[in-house]
Image (cartoon, rainbow, N blue to C red):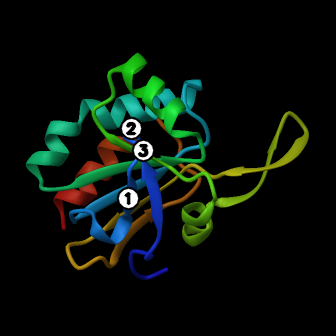
Amino acid sequence: MDELPDVAATGADGQPLSLRDLPRPLVVYFYPKDDTPGCTREAQDFSALADDFAAAGVHVLGVSRDSVAKHAKFIAKHDLRVALASDLDGSVTEAFGVWGEKQMYGRTYMGVERATFLFDRDGRLARAWRKVKVPDHAAAVLEAARAL
């Protein structure tokens, strides 16, 4: 993937959301599940840096396959300051190649890979982080975004 895919999700407000229509530069981060420890920490870290991303002119969008209702509860519970989108049909996770086989506790299952993608003003992929480890990740993404 060299440029922002032409795919749509549903915003946390229940409205359709075309990724190509979002302001750029754009950070799209994928996470497995609302309100789990790693995913909560990642959303909180991006939220803590929301003003810094905004000052750099960078829009941030978190995507999971959770429902709009779950996103709304997740945002309210943790006072999140980044936009979230629901990918119930899996079209966004498929387009970004982040839906696949995972393993935990010896069990194999299908799920969302924790990954982040940074797109420049022209919608070209500037940087991708795959198999993300949460600590310090949001700060590293901000640093890369500022360097655009």
Category of crowding for the residue at label 2, using alpha-carbon neighbours closer than 10 angstroms: few (below 14), some (14–19), many (at least 20): few
Residue at x-position 20% and y-position 55%: 58
Residue furthest to the bottom in view is 2
60 or 140, nearer to the observer: 60
In the rendered picture of this protein, how many numbered marks are placed on residues? 3
Task: Tell whether 141 sits left or right of 98.
Answer: left
Mark 1 vs 2, N-terminal side:
1
Image coordinates for residue 3, horizontal then vertical, percent = 39, 80
Mark 3 near mark 2, Cβ–Cβ under 8 Å? no
Residue at x-position 51% and y-position 32%: 69
Secondary structure of the residue carrying numbered label 2 = loop
Q: Please state which amino acid type lies under the numbered disc 1.
A: Leu
C-alpha span from label 3 to label 1: 9 Å
**What residue does disc 3 label?**
14
Secondary structure of the residue carrying numbered label 3 = loop
Q: Please state which amino acid type lies under the numbered disc 3.
A: Gly
Residue furthest to the front in view is 15
Residue at x-position 44% and y-position 76%: 5
Mark seen at residue 79: none
State which quadrant residue 59 falls in: bottom left
Task: Tell whether 94 sits left or right of 41.
Answer: right
Q: Please state which amino acid type lies under the numbered disc 2.
A: Asp
**What residue does disc 2 label?**
136
Label 1 or label 2, whichever lies nearer to me, is: 1
**What residue does disc 1 label?**
17
Residue furthest to the top in view is 77
C-alpha span from label 3 to label 2: 31 Å
107 or 23, nearer to the observer: 23
State the quadrant of the C terminus.
Answer: bottom left
C-alpha span from label 1 to label 2: 28 Å
